[in-house]
Amino acid sequence: MKKILVTGGCGFIGSHTSLALLEKGYELLIVDSLVNSFPVVIEKIISLLNKSYPNIEKQIHLKKCDLCDLNLLKKVFQEFNSDKPISAVMHFAGLKAVSDSLSFPLSYWESNVLGTINLLKVMDEFDCRNLVFSSSATIYGFHEKKKDLKEDDFKKPFNTYGDTKYTIEKILKSLVQANRKDWRFAILRYFNPVGAHTSGIIGESPRNFANNIMPIINSVALRQREHLYIFGNDWNTLDGTPIRDYIHIDDLVEGHIKALEHLFKNKSKEISLNLGTGRGSSVLQLIKVFEEVNHINIPYKFSPRRDGDIAYYVADNSLAKKVLNWEPKKDLHEMCKDSWNWVSKNPYGYSKQ
Ligand code: UDP
């Protein structure tokens, strides 16, 4: 049984990936600062797997640790590494609110970039040099033409969050270029992850509300807010609202598992891949599907454009499909259904459990 260290494993993408890693038989150490997540998610994961794997709780460990605390991180790594070495790190930890990154840039540089440098230093010290990294499509920034984004397209992040992700990518590439040690990196650029585990037992539940479209649609569906404000209806798109590439969390997770296996097969030293479905949907299309699938009316109003928004952001995912032999399977209907299934069963997320 290989050992994997998962940073940010209590968060949305980290927790769903941890569940899949456990099912695959990996032993996990989750390192999470818990600043934006809840430890109870580990109990939920165990409860989901207990029936099929009665000893599952022995396979998952949680340590509260901020990656900025280098000494604690070293200690945690040493402890988990002791009887058998850690084979790889899946690195999800980081701050991710675009608007906060513009208001509090130092926190973003510190948590995301310094945290990653600490992680890489400790990995190097313990001879663990396989890393799957959560990057973001935000790094591409603004492209004049409406075309699907390819991995080698021009990159110009326009917010501090995107800048930190791009900087980390450059740090990882510099380690491969230095060619002194056998580092292997899979850099996964997410488009718009939504949905939840089909059980409705785990899902997205940050401590700080995420101002992304799906959590907002859900809060309107819960009648916690009256309207959804659509940021602009004058974009150059089919219905005037912006197009995004929404991807179900299950497909995203499968991409991670395949990327990890790709690293273990020593296939490449460094690979950057877009994880999106390659299909774009407008805000109005998303609302319509949500309403149809869940039989809930979502009242909306148009408001002015949001700063930094872009009309069209869709992945060319052909490289990920080819390299990983990966195929996203779930459509917008399943994304909306699973998302509401989780939220309707857990209207306060993990916060009141
Ligand atoms: N959006 C919106 N109203 C909201 C939140 C988002 O109209 O309250 C739109 C936003 O303009 C964008 C899309 O929904 O076109 C996805 O936004 P989100 O913040 O989820 O992701 P990102 O903009 O980072 O792709």
Image (cartoon, rainbow, N blue to C red):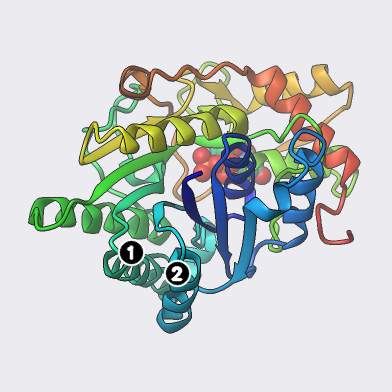
- Contact, CB < 8 Å: mark 1 with mark 2? yes
Q: Sequence-wise, which precedes: disc 1 or disc 2?
A: 2
Name the spot of residue 36 as percent of width and height, x first.
64, 64
| Total marks placed | 2
Q: Which mark is residue 184?
A: none
Q: Residues within 10 Å of mark 2 (few under 14, many from 20)?
A: many
Horizontal placement of 297 versus 193: left or right? right
Looking at the image, the residue that sits furthest to the bottom is 71
Q: Which residue is mark 1?
A: 123
Residue 77: image tag: 2
Identify residue type, mark 1.
Met
Which residue is pictured at 33% across the width and 40% down the height?
142
Does residue 179 appear in this view? yes
Q: Quadrant of residue 189?
A: top left
* Residue 310 located left or right of residue 144: right
Secondary structure under tag 1 reads: helix
**Along the line of sight, the residue nearer the viewer: 276 or 199:** 199
Q: Quadrant of residue 41?
A: bottom right
Asked whether mark 1 lies closer than 8 Å to ligand 1, one says no
